[in-house]
Amino acid sequence: TLVDIDAAVLDAARRFFPACAAGLDDPRTEVHVSDGAAFAAAAAARGDTYDLVICDSTDCSAAERASGTLYTDAFLVSVAALVAPGGFFCRNYSSLLWNTDEAVATLPRYAAHFAYASPFVWMQPTYSSGSYSALLCGGAAPSVRDLAADAETLGETDYWTPAVHKAAFALPAFVARRMSPTSPPAPPTSDES
């Protein structure tokens, strides 16, 4: 199931990223042009569940932004209901190098809805800081995987390796200290409810 508020995004994906967009036309894919928050609320009300919910919205959490509804407690309540036992919610988060204060301030919101909420990072040369993060949330921490077996199954990849996978969850020391549950978060700078 894929939800996007703008059909032009789907058209652009097909035109400019045909290899990535090929899945849009897979018969197993349900594509909905709809507001993500409204879709999540309706799906949760129906009792739908998913093993993985990914929210790749704009990276501003301020409620006055276009994607503001995707940062509200109401949205997080819906998403928490949608995540199946053992499943996860993953969303783009922030540059932990540049926006540490925002990440620290918003993490408690996610922790209020999910027993596990932790960022992970990757190198992203097209982003000004050189790295970016996502937030992984669920009912429990991810289980330890046999990454060597995964690598054998996947074969040669252009980017992913077991070492890259492990490194994504290793936060810089100053970020880890700030994201610690014992560190008091800075208050949000805007109304994000």
Image (cartoon, rainbow, N blue to C red):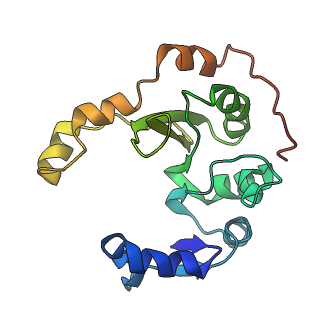
Count of numbered circles on the image: 0
- Which quadrant of the structure image shows residue 74? bottom right
Q: Report whether residue 141 is seen.
A: no
Q: Is residue 100 visible?
A: yes
**On the picture, is 38 further left or further right than 92?**
right
Left/right placement of residue 26 relative to residue 149 reads right
Does residue 170 appear to the left or right of 47 in the view shown? left
Q: Is residue 166 above or below residue 10?
A: above
Q: Horizontal and vertical percent for residue 60? A: 69, 47
What residue do we see at 57% from left, 42% from top?
A: 139
For this orientation, the residue located farthest to the right is 191
Residue beneath the point at 66% across and 68% down: 47
Residue 101 drawn above or below residue 15? above
Q: Position of residue 40 (x, y in %)?
A: 68, 66
- In the rendered image of this protein, does residue 150 appear above or below residue 83? above
Residue in the picture at 71% in, 35% down: 106
Can you give x and y, in whole percent of width and height, for residue 188 in the image? Answer: 81, 33
Foreground residue among 95 and 53:
95
Q: Position of residue 25 (x, y in %)?
A: 39, 84
Answer above or below: position of 99 versus 192: above
Q: Quadrant of residue 175?
A: top right
Between residues 75 and 22, which one lies in front from this camera angle?
A: 22
